[in-house]
Structures are given as structure tokens and as C-alpha cells.
Amino acid sequence: MSDQSISVPPLAVDPGTGRRAGPAQAIVLLLASCLSVLGAVLLAPVLPRIQDAFAGTPGVATLTPTVLTVPALVIGLTASIAGRVVDRLGRKRLLVGALVGYAFVGTAPLWLSSLPLIVASRVLVGLTEAAIMTCCTTLLADYFHGPQRVRYFGLQTVYTTVAATIFFAVGGLLGSWGWRTPFWLYAVSLPLAFVAARVVWQPPQQKKEKLPPLPWRGLLVPVGVTLAGGLVFYVLIVELSYVLDGIGVTATATIGLVSAVASLATAVAAYLFPRVARLGPAVTIPAAFVLCGLGILGLALATSVPVVVIGAVVTGLGNGLMLPALLTWALGTLTFAQRGRGTGIWTSALFIGQFASPLVVLALSGATSGLSPALLVVGAAALLLAVVVRIVRPPRPAVA
């Protein structure tokens, strides 16, 4: 094993107090990671109300879904830049500043009076989310090593998916009091910023010198697979309500319940990931795509609620396995000085895939005359990608 693949253990020690990183630091970083899913699921139940509220706005049918998806695009376009800033300026300063900014731009739609201005505020939300996600993932990799790092990468997905489950329910409840009400939840990042400022510390930086180049030969393949993985991952989140609507289920409570069950399945798979991580990405990543592909095929063919639930649960299991497997693969061989940029590039690929997901499904729906045929194509593509990744046999990363 080369020296570059080994992280130095003292990086997990607070240089000011000598404390080792532990549950307190991990919990703050895991909770902050949940903020990236807040916009993705919190507003889904109120999108029709937003469209009704701005019915006279030109292009409202296109702008309204953008309220939900544009943060993911911005994260995808800027996370790699955030990664370079992280490596240059430090993790803690950027994280605390982004958490404070997130609260202000996230709650802005409470007072904005036009849909284009709300979309603009969501662009700023995406910028802060890019910084938060990159800092949190990089700090988890800095603080923890070996099996402990694998465990926390899995828990990162557990936390975000459990948060998604809660946000689905809370968003629907708050939405019953008006479409603006859910935006108040963005203020939750302010207490997180205060706690992070006290609990999180900046790992000792190396001497100011030119950053070492990234190992592109080993990074491009996992990043490319992550791009496709982001697209597959988001299919369940975006399309589940439309699948239910297609079989006659329009009750918000039922849609929220099925979504919550799928999110819990994702959390369960992510929680169990450390137990299967020893098998390596050559096994875990194909397994994730197989589960997602089979689940999406089930959603495409479903004609009743129980079948939709089964398809959603299987897809959710694949989602929960996919993200920590891809992340462990991509970051496992990067050094401290490379990790921020590597995390940013990985995050960019994931969120560009997520932003593209509804657009790809919409295009396929138009080309194949319906959502069900489009989901059949996506499900089959996921299964094909599982075969390709298995043949390529990605190397087991040296998770130090």
C-alpha cells in the first residue's frame, strides 16, 4: 500500500485541546448533512399550491418544479469549487458561514412576492448546501479512519434518509397551513451553526504550498458511476407520487406514508452498509444498482398500492446501499490535501445526476408515451450498469 493512501491518525485530534473526534463531532456533521435533503422533499407536497399561487406568472409550469430541483443543480455545478475552497481555506470556517447563510436564503420565500425571485433564492440555497455537504463529508473523512469512517459514511445516509422521512411528513403538515409555512424550517441551521462553531475544529493544515494533483485515473470511473447513481437515486423521490397518482391514489396522507416507508428502507440499508462494506465496491455497487433497477421496474409495472410499496421498498434498499458504497470507493485512496476537492467533485456528480433525473424521465416519458415505459427504460439501464460495474470490478479502496 502506498503512503498516499494512508491518512495520518493525528488529524483526528483537536490541536487546541488534544481531544479526539468522537460522537459529538460526528452528530453535528451528520445533522448538518441532512440539510441537503430539506429542499428536496420538504416542498414536494406544496408544489401544486405554489403553482396555483403564481398561476399568472409566465412559464409557471416550468418554474414551479425548478423551486424543488434547482438547488441540486447548483450543488452539482459548484461543489467542486467548494471542495477547492475547503482544501485552501479550511473546513470549519466555511461550514459555519454556510450554515448561517443557509438560514437566511432558505427562509427568504416567506417574504418574496414573485416566483422568479423565489427561484433565485433557491439558487443561493444550492450554493450554501454545496459548501455544507462538502465540508461535512470531508470532515467525517478527516476525523475518522478505517472501519469507523465506513460506519459514519453509512450513518450519513441513514441520517439523511430518516430526515427525508420526517421532512415528507412535516412538509405535508405545514403545507396545510399555507405553501409558505414549510420554509420556516430552514431556520434550523442557525442553532446548528452555533453548535458547530463550538464542537467542530479545523484539522491541522499542511504548509501552504501547491495542492497535490488529484489521481484522476482512479477518480474518474467512480465519479462517472456516481453521476448515473444520482440519476437512479432520485427516481424514487421524484416519481413515486406520480406513480401513485397514475393508479388513482391522490390522498396526500397515503402518498406521504408510502414515501416514508421507502425512506425508512433506505435508512435500514445504509445502517447495515458497514456489515457488507468488507465485500468491497465490486460487490456492493452492483448490488445497489440491481436493487434499484428491480424496484424501479416494479414501480413501472405496478397497478395497486401494495405493489407500489414493494417496488418503493426495494428501490429504497438499493438507494441506501448505493451512496455510502460510491462515496467509500471514491474517497478511499485520497490523501488529506486531496480529500476536499475529491469530495466536491463526487458531490457535484451526485447532484447533477439528481437534477437530471426528472428531466431524463420526462424526456423518456415523451419518447415512450408515458411514465411507466420511461421507468422501464431507467430500471433496465440500472440493471445494465450493475453488470458493467461488476465486469469492470472496481478496486477495493484503502479506507484509512
Image: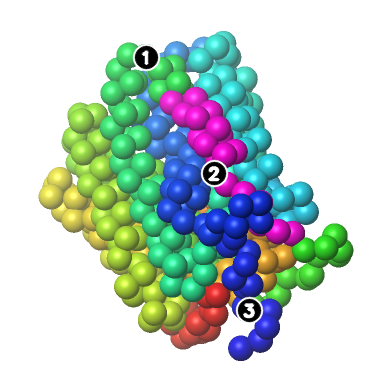
Q: Nearer the viewer, residue 34 or 183?
A: 34
Q: Residue at x 21, y 38 (%)?
A: 257
Indicate the amino acid at tag 3: Ser
Residue carrying label 1: 178
Q: Is residue 290 above or below residue 137?
A: below
Quadrant (top left/top right/bottom left/bottom right) for the C terminus: bottom right
Q: Could you classify mark 3 by the number of other residues whose Cα lies within 10 Å: few (under 14), some (14-19), or many (20 or more)?
A: some
In the picture provided, is 299 more to the left or to the right than 30? left
Tell me which label, 1 or 3, sits earlier in the chain: 3
In the picture provided, is 24 more to the left or to the right than 117? left
Q: Residue at x 30, y 65 (%)?
A: 272
Residue 359 in the image, given as x and y percentages of width and height: 50, 46
Residue carrying label 2: 199
Q: CA distance from mark 2 to mark 3?
A: 28 Å
Residue 299 seen in this snapshot = no
Q: Is residue 188 above or below residue 24?
A: above
Q: Residue at x 39, y 74 (%)?
A: 277
Residue 389 in the image, given as x and y percentages of width and height: 47, 78
Q: Residue furthest front?
A: 17
Q: CA distance from mark 2 to mark 1?
A: 36 Å
Q: Could you classify mark 1 by the number of other residues whose Cα lies within 10 Å: few (under 14), some (14-19), or many (20 or more)?
A: few
Q: Which mark is residue 5?
A: 3
